[in-house]
Amino acid sequence: MVLKYTFKTATRALITHKVRSFLTILGIVIGIAAIILVSSVGESANNVIVGELGGLGAETVVIRPGKEPKGPTDIAETLFSDSLKERELEALKKKGNVPDIADISPEILVPGSVSYAGETYKPVILGFSADFMTDTLGLVVSEGASFGEAEIRARSKVAVIGRKVAVELFGNNNPIGEQIQIKNNKFRVVGLFEKRGQVVFFDVDELVLVPYSTAQTYLSGNDYYTQIIARAVSPEKVDGVVYDIKRTLRDLHKIDDPEKDDFYVQTQQGLVEQVESIIGVFTLFLSLVVAVSLVVGGVGIMNIMLVSVTERTKEIGLRKAVGATSKDIMLQFLTEAVILTFAGGLIGVIIGVSLSFMVSVLAKLIAGFALSFVFPIVPALVGIFVSVLVGVVFGIYPAREASKKSPIEALRYE
């Protein structure tokens, strides 16, 4: 009964000053809403990226140049490393070195734009094996034809383009057989990809695919590859393929100490774990930054509660005069602080979830990015718990100050 009466009294006191109560919890509301938004969008992005990586297939192995990056400062070194060249590709193709590789292709990413008859567009220009890409990613050339090993060996200036590239450059006209220009070189369009959208890290509709040998000779001007992608004969053979790749490249580069590797190998599972780790750390960092507002909100609550104690001095004296103990007074003011922060946490969760849902909808409508909505159950529960904890921590001092007041002095207070 005492707790029930205390709750009613505390609630009535807060409702009496509705505007002040809302302004008091505003910091808590903003903090919890921001944490929910960051958690929800972070988890949604993680699901999208992991799902796209799954499109590579469990049997895919990626060989990248340079040391495996352990932090942001290592990424630049990796991007400009030239440790993967034609001799590395030829060594990995030999069955005696890596017997369980089903297929392998180097990749060259070419920055730049494509033009045709005065129209210019900036797509993703990729030097690769068309057969490897269609087999691994399931891409379909719906019009014209693809290119094969003959075109790769001949360094032919041919290209297969995505639907959006075709529309931007040719409108409604048929692009097959037309000549497009890439870095002052004419390429003949031989095929058109079926409309597909996002696959792994690029949009097929914005892709211009050329033979990797052609890209290396005429476009990049480099003798090294951006990366090499291999496919094991089965997912069960991936570990063996990774071991054989490392052994082959270390022998080729005369490396005895694995710590001195000038390359690194990633599997589909490894990529998923790396992405999850990066997004997890990023989400945690943002959440910690946002959590500062909870502390600010807690300080604000403490200040307002102290003002409230001063304003209600006569009320405290009257309650003590009719029998209320110091414990009852302390419990009432502490209950008020907890009710305030609990309400702030609940409102913050509702606002955060609503904003997360809006972000997922806008991402689809504006950017065409399929960002699914994820309700962050654990962050929501933790957010409410933390908000209540803030109320307890920052409400104890004002509650104690209220309980210490002498009933005689309080009744005489003007």
Image (cartoon, helix red, strand yellow):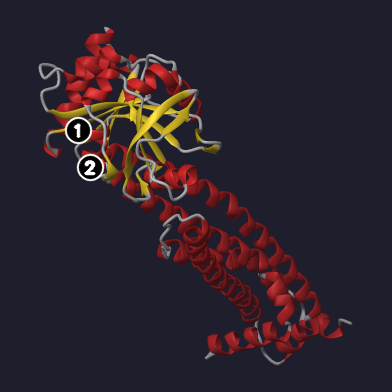
The reply to whether residue 66 is in sight is no
Name the one closer to the observer, 403 or 117: 117
Q: Position of residue 191 (x, y in %)?
A: 31, 39
Give, as a three-letter code, the residue at label 2: Gly
Name the disc covering residue 339, or none: none
Q: Between marks 1 and 2, how big is the CA–CA gap? A: 9 Å
Q: Are discs 1 and 2 less than 8 Å apart at CB?
A: yes
Name the one closer to the observer, 70 or 53: 53
Q: Is residue 221 above or below residue 112?
A: above
Give, as a three-letter code, the residue at label 1: Arg
Q: Is residue 166 above or below residue 107?
A: below
Q: Which quadrant of the figure has residue 220?
A: top left
Q: Position of residue 396 (x, y in %)?
A: 63, 67
* Residue shown at the point (35%, 51%) measured from the top left: 195
Crowd band around label 2 with a 10 angstrom C-alpha radius: few (<14), some (14–19), many (20+): some
Q: Residue furthest right?
A: 414
Quick one: label 1 or label 2, which is nearer the N terminus? Answer: 2
Residue annotated with mark 2: 57
Relative to residue 219, is residue 323 drawn left or right?
Answer: right
Q: Position of residue 186 (x, y in %)?
A: 43, 26
Residue annotated with mark 1: 231
The reply to whether residue 178 is in sight is yes
Q: Position of residue 123 (x, y in %)?
A: 46, 38
Q: Secondary structure at mark 1?
A: strand
